[in-house]
Amino acid sequence: MNSHSNLRGVFFDEEAFQALESLFSKKSYSKVILLCDANTHEHCLPPFLANAPFIGDSNLEILELEPGEETKSIEILAQVWDAFGALEMDRKSILINIGGGVITDLGGFAAATYMRGIDFVNFPSSLLAMVDASVGSKTGINFGGFKNRIGLFSDPQLVGIIPDFLKTLAPEELKSGWAEMLKHGLIADDAHFQELVNRAYKAEAFDAGIIKRSISIKAAVVNQDKYEGGLRKILNFGHTIGHALESYYHQAGQPISHGYAVGLGMIVELGLSVDYADLDAAKASAIQLQLRSEFSFPPLKIEKETFLNLVIGDKKNSAGQLQFSLLADAGKAVFDKQIALESIWPYMEREGL
Amino acid sequence: MNSHSNLRGVFFDEEAFQALESLFSKKSYSKVILLCDANTHEHCLPPFLANAPFIGDSNLEILELEPGEETKSIEILAQVWDAFGALEMDRKSILINIGGGVITDLGGFAAATYMRGIDFVNFPSSLLAMVDASVGSKTGINFGGFKNRIGLFSDPQLVGIIPDFLKTLAPEELKSGWAEMLKHGLIADDAHFQELVNRAYKAEAFDAGIIKRSISIKAAVVNQDKYEGGLRKILNFGHTIGHALESYYHQAGQPISHGYAVGLGMIVELGLSVDYADLDAAKASAIQLQLRSEFSFPPLKIEKETFLNLVIGDKKNSAGQLQFSLLADAGKAVFDKQIALESIWPYMEREGL
């Protein structure tokens, strides 16, 4: 089933469990820790464990964290490191992350830095984690008010994708992943974008086929530029504005999901794309219209100064200069578009912010 | 002068500044942060900056930490990450670590995880950091009472060794580095060991030549096995007992230096080497005698249970089994010698502990 040859290490459904079993028989781990949150503990662990009898009970421990972005903090990271020690994990132990991006990012970082790195695998439970965090090797935590400020590149031994996990997700959580999939289409594959806008984002709509297609777009980019020296930056389309919006609404006590913020970020950056990347204005308007029907800005006046400070703090920006990834066409992105901080505000105002 | 071809990235004296200058002209860093402690701020920064006029003042900031092992903590790490943010370091910034192992380990880890990794260089100021931390790519902090429990492998852009930095070191600090040099001799080069015991460990005795020879031994080992899958473990000779002693005396409020602890650890592990690695008993006694004249156990009764718990917590041990690196001969080490925890105690008692 794994026909997309660029998806090395990513397995779907029964193949994921087969790959995990062969990893386990090769490595004979001293200890197996399952990291989850309350939601995945309830909904994903039972089917996961039923399909992975080879893990056995004797060395298995379960660590459960609070769901939510707040968990991706240095305090919780320290608690996880503490728990690893208390559970006597050693260099031959493995961590299995079952959860959304919070669990896979934090768990991956904890594993990559415990005793200078132990094995870990990811079984993403949200659509966002499946299509976004599943490839690219990024791990980390939020710090000092900034998303993913602390982290590193570290590869899981494998990623297992079980689309059935999506069935218990709330619609707004599906929308978060859907936004990143739309982004994959917009930056590299217009047909994928059209296919997505024509589907309702119900769990059943996200089968292994369409998930695989979306991941393959990301994997093709990442494989060419793992450390984000160049091309990989196109994956940041919608994110410079999106991250700042996410931080802004979070600080204002009206949090929105990462994907939803990216959806809004893409709307603003489509406007920028017309003026800074020669995107056809009519095309931009048509795409913005499609996006606005699904992603609407919360009814909250955005304070300019605060917002621009959040934008400038983004780690993609160097020496005070903003670096945008924008669209030159539907299905074609460009990167390293330099824009002065002040110049972006009118594009925000155009959205009534 | 860099005649040892395996010392890639390690430069001495004026060549170190030349290498740094060429790095700076290649990269044009947005911001330069110098991480030091109060001692290196006073003694090493002035000569360093005098030799590195190309850094300039405009982008330079200095971060000073408290000297001492306590600094290698998650709390200080978080403060350093905070400072990076406050100083507006971005992905094109560089961290220059000037200090002992505490500064290079913590600074390296902070840089390797800030925004998923920024450039850093190390200018070690202690003999221990020069001969030990300068090669091998290990970075990290202490955690949960264990040395280097959290960390990762990350390469500095370059290591600059300035033997003149040693002139302000206290004799006991020199001894700490000297112990690791002795270890390099014992595990791989008996002539180096003999050369070292015949020199007094005064700063003048440690010139670029002998430092380079000692580092070359370590580099030869590390280059063959960077991630410690096999051969690299021989560098742990003296360390299984040594680390536990270091933690024990630290917790007892009578801290000893890392190198000193390794010196003591080697004495005990020489006894183990006779019974578990076929080291000639007379040879072991002769070496122990040489070591005992320089490294004596503090007058403190060691509580067996507490000590053995510290030994078993060492990250080199897997599933409760102790893994020792021992000597088969003077100048020849072996690794993965399994010894049951209880069996080591008589070798401690033999030293009157």
Image (spheres, coloured by chain):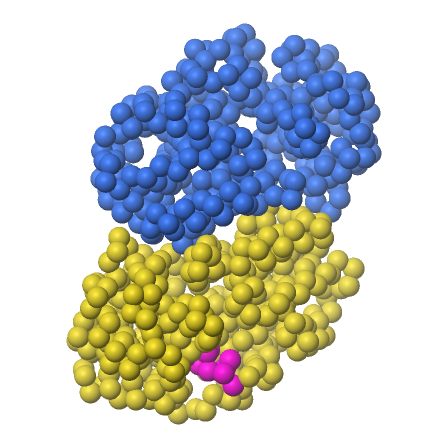
Chain colours: A blue, B yellow
Residue A330 in the image: state x and y as whole percent: 63, 18
Q: Is residue A311 above or below residue B237?
A: above
Residue A93 in the image: state x and y as whole percent: 32, 46
Would residue B174 be found to the left or right of residue B123 on screen? left
Which quarter of the picture shows residue B259?
Answer: bottom left
Residue at the (17%, 75%) spot, across then down: B275
Q: Is residue A100 above or below residue B330?
A: above
Q: Is residue A135 above or below residue B60?
A: above
Q: In this orientation, which residue lies closer to the viewer: A19 or A285?
A: A19
Residue B30 in sight: no
Quadrant location of the C terminus of chain B? bottom left
Residue B44 in the image: state x and y as whole percent: 65, 75
Please give the range of residues in magenta: B171-181
Residue at the (64%, 26%) spot, across then down: A255
Would residue A217 be found to the left or right of residue B315 on screen? right
Residue B271 lies within the magenta run: no
Residue A118 in sight: yes
Q: In this orientation, which residue lies closer to the viewer: B137 or B102?
A: B102
Residue at the (62%, 52%) spot, across then down: B81
Residue A109 in the image: state x and y as whole percent: 47, 44
Q: Is residue A260 above or below residue B165?
A: above
How many numbered marks, from 0 up?
0
Query: Predominant secondary structure in magenta?
Result: helix
Residue at the (45%, 91%) spot, across then down: B200
